Image (spheres, helix red, strand yellow):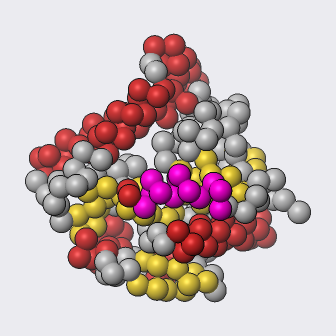
């Protein structure tokens, strides 16, 4: 797998930063609270910006704000950007939103034949109430994760990396069979409605935590409301953004000793199948 040069990676990061600035601008205009999550929150807290080898930006918002964003942002976004959802792009491989930058390309191997918009992007994730009871919590997570994988496999015909062995080629064939079977025998709209129904099952019910169920690990992005609000302002690449009130606890829960850099061998960013930066 190809590795970025420092110049290539920085060029991608700066385009992503444009998308983040636009998301923040639109959220401010709509009085929507958005906050950095995952590696973007870690980057803000440890580096004051991107993790130096990272090429990703993750933004979260509560479901009610997320729904407003999906509804109202398209009429406010600068025409340099496109809000990608399963509704605005029928070929989208993702069940959450991305703000894509027009005139750019960021094509992952598994999507190289997909005709969706594949510009450089900022991920926008919904956060929903999750049950305090661990049994119910895990049941919701397992059901959502299963449906989300089905949705992704239905929309994406290939594996994530080029096959390098007989076993890899077999996996690639199995994946294609799964994809075309799901296209033939599942209804995309019905599947997406089931995803939404599962994710929002506990919204409107008093619970102490919210989570982004799109993260692939149980409790992988869960946070107590008391640790989330009120959001606090931090710097990210010279702009002011919001993170959870207790971002330190959030990051410790998710990453352990997040203040310590990983070994140099792991401080590497991998390029996707195709990258193009607009002039």
In the orientation shown, which residue stands out farthest toward the right? 279
Residue situated in front as seen by the camera: 110 or 138: 138
- The correct choice, above or below, for 122 with respect to 216 in the image is below
In this view of the protein, can residue 110 be seen by the observer? no
**Residue 252 screen position, x and y as percent:** 31, 75
> Does the stretch in magenta take in 71?
yes
Secondary structure predominantly adopted by residues drawn in magenta: helix
Image height check: is 159 above or below 212? above
Taking the image as shown, residue 111 lies to the left or right of residue 185, namely right
Residue at the (37%, 37%) spot, across then down: 195
* Residue that appears at 71% across and 33% down: 115
Q: Is residue 276 left or right of residue 66?
A: right
**Residue 184 in view, yes or no:** yes
Up-down: is 214 above or below 27? above
Magenta span contains residue 182: no
**Residue drawn 49% across and 86% down?**
234
96 or 160, nearer to the observer? 96
Near-viewer residue (2 or 238) = 238
Residue 38 percent across, percent down from the top left: 44, 66
Quarter residue 50 falls in: bottom right
> Which residue occupies 89% across, 63% down?
279
State the image quarter where residue 54 is shown: bottom right
Part of the protein shown in magenta: 65-76
Residue 37 position (above or below residue 246): above
Nearest to the observer: residue 171 or residue 219? 219
The picture places residue 123, in percent across and down from the top left corner, at 55, 57
Rendered location of residue 52, percent (x, y):
61, 74
- What is the tally of numbered marks visible in this picture? 0
């Amino acid at each position: 797998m190809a590795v970025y040069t420092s110049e290539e990676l920085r060029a991608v990061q700066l385009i992503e930063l444009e998308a983040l600035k636009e998301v923040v601008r639109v959220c401010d205009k709509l009085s929507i609270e958005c906050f950095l999550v995952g590696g973007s929150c870690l980057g803000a807290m440890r580096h004051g910006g991107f993790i130096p080898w990272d090429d990703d930006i993750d933004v979260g918002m509560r479901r009610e704000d997320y729904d407003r964003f999906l509804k109202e942002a398209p009429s406010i976004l600068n025409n340099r950007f496109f809000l990608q959802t399963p509704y605005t792009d029928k070929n989208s491989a993702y069940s959450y939103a991305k703000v894509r930058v027009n005139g750019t390309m960021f094509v992952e191997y598994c999507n190289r034949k997909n005709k969706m918009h594949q510009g450089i992007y900022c991920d926008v994730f919904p956060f929903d109430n999750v049950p305090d009871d661990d049994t119910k919590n895990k049941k919701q997570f397992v059901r959502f994760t299963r449906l989300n994988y089905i949705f992704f496999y239905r929309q994406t015909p290939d594996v994530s990396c080029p096959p390098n062995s007989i076993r890899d080629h077999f996996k690639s064939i199995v994946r294609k069979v799964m994809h075309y079977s799901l296209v033939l025998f599942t209804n995309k709209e019905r599947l997406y409605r089931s995803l939404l129904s599962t994710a929002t099952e506990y919204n409107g019910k008093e619970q102490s935590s919210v989570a982004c169920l799109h993260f692939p690990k149980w409790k992988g992005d869960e946070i107590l409301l008391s640790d989330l609000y009120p959001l606090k302002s931090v710097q990210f690449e010279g702009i002011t953004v919001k993170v959870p009130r207790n971002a330190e606890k959030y990051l410790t829960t998710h990453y352990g000793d997040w203040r310590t850099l990983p070994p140099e061998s792991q401080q590497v960013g991998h390029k996707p199948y195709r990258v193009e930066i607009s002039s």
